[in-house]
Amino acid sequence: MRRVYLDNNATTPVLPEILDAMRPYFLEHFGNASSIHHHGQETRAAVERACESVAQLVGCRGSEIVFTSGGTEGDNLAISGLARPGDHIITSTIEHHAVLNTCKHLESTGIEVTYVPVDGRGLVDPDDVRRALRPTTRLITIMMANNETGVIQPVEEIGRISAEADVYFHTDAVQAAGKVELDVNRIGCDLLSISGHKMHAPQGVGALYVRKGTLLQPMFHGGRHERSRRAGTENVPGIVALGKAAELAKQGLENGEVTRLAALRDQIEQTVLQQVETIGINGAGAPRVPNTTNIHFDHIEGEALVIALDLKGLAVSTGAACSSGALEPSHVLIAMGLRPDQARASLRFSLGKQNKNDDVEFALGLIPSTVARLRELSPVYQKA
Ligand SMILES: Cc1ncc(COP(=O)(O)O)c(C=O)c1O
């Protein structure tokens, strides 16, 4: 059976060039990057090259990159590494749980958190961020691109607000890396997290940009790896893969690859809008990353649609989370003002570099008929 994968915001396949780049670091160049002999020097040099590639992707110096195990660790290190009891943090209601639950945890330790809302397009209003500032505010953490809708936040304006107020600014750029230009100086952030597996490197590796002079309390205690900011023997193959992924991401932004994905995404939206009634694009009207669309198919259970499409070979996802056996509608879509039934009826389609025109045609051959069939079975739809 043919299978098409349009769930690249969940994870991406490792690209062959990236696998080729990392392979020697399992077999031939296996040294510990902290060892002083030949084997260690070889892997140390590879880590440093990868560091430069990641630094070039985000526009910083190599010494400002800390390799992590992924986006979750980067977000935790940025936020927990800065906040102290008595501090105040500003974040938004649509952050990934890596940020939201870190903030929730910190609230239990005497740190205060303001969660700024978003409008119907999924956008934070920078004025809300400004109004939330307090004398005790230590950090603003607002994501660059939302994982469910792809909506891009006004991070440059938020960066200016943080600079004027002299508070730290962290942005979770996990879903932005490789999809839009990243430049930490233009954004004006002090910390920025990325994750390898969202950009065709393997799962379990990521990086945190830490502006020079930003003193982070490390989360792991151990050796003096990563300039004492993250103890633990480096994941050299993963780091090499992330370096290669950063190079390819930069090239993709320059050589039209990203524009190609935007055209495919637009094709999905236009065709579905033409062929399926009572639907809407979540986040339409806001700037969005080119690979993501999130569509609400009213009168349908999104989960049922995901399963029906999966049975026909198409992998997509809902933003719903399963908590205590019940499907909770996506906190992001609810924050944007969708009704719970609309949020539950929403699906995310996210493209990756491996997707071609015929993948989109395959998807478009399935979506309208599958929605129609599920709606036929829905008593709610018949009454509508
Ligand atoms: C916006 C965002 N932040 C953080 C993460 C967590 O990244 P990781 O899976 O590398 O821990 C994800 C993963 O889905 C994400 O989409």
Image (cartoon, grey):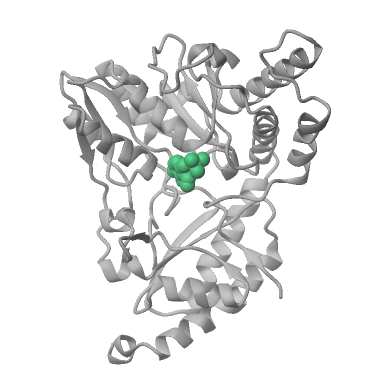
Residue at position x 69%, y 34% in the image: 241
Q: Image check: 26 left or right of 132?
A: right
44 or 274: nearer the eye? 44
Q: Image check: 2 left or right of 212?
A: right
Where residue 274 sits: x, y (%)? 49, 76
Where residue 233 sits: x, y (%)? 60, 22
The quadrant in which the N terminus is found is bottom right
Residue at position x 40%, y 59% in the image: 319
Residue 37 position (above or below residue 108)? above
Q: Image check: 89 left or right of 152?
A: left
User: In the rendered image, is residue 192 in sight?
Assistant: yes
Residue at position x 63%, y 73% in the image: 313
Where residue 86 sits: x, y (%)? 17, 20
Single out the residue that lies furthest toward the right.
28
Residue at position x 43%, y 54% in the image: 148
User: In the rendered image, is residue 273 in sight?
Assistant: no
Q: Residue 256, located in which quarter of the rendered image?
A: top right
144 or 76: nearer the eye? 76
Where residue 68 sits: x, y (%)? 53, 28
Q: Residue 362, located in which quarter of the rendered image?
A: bottom right
The quadrant in which the C terminus is found is bottom left
Q: Image check: 268 left or right of 376?
A: right
Q: Residue 329, located in which quarter of the rendered image?
A: bottom left
Residue 330 position (above or below residue 363)? above
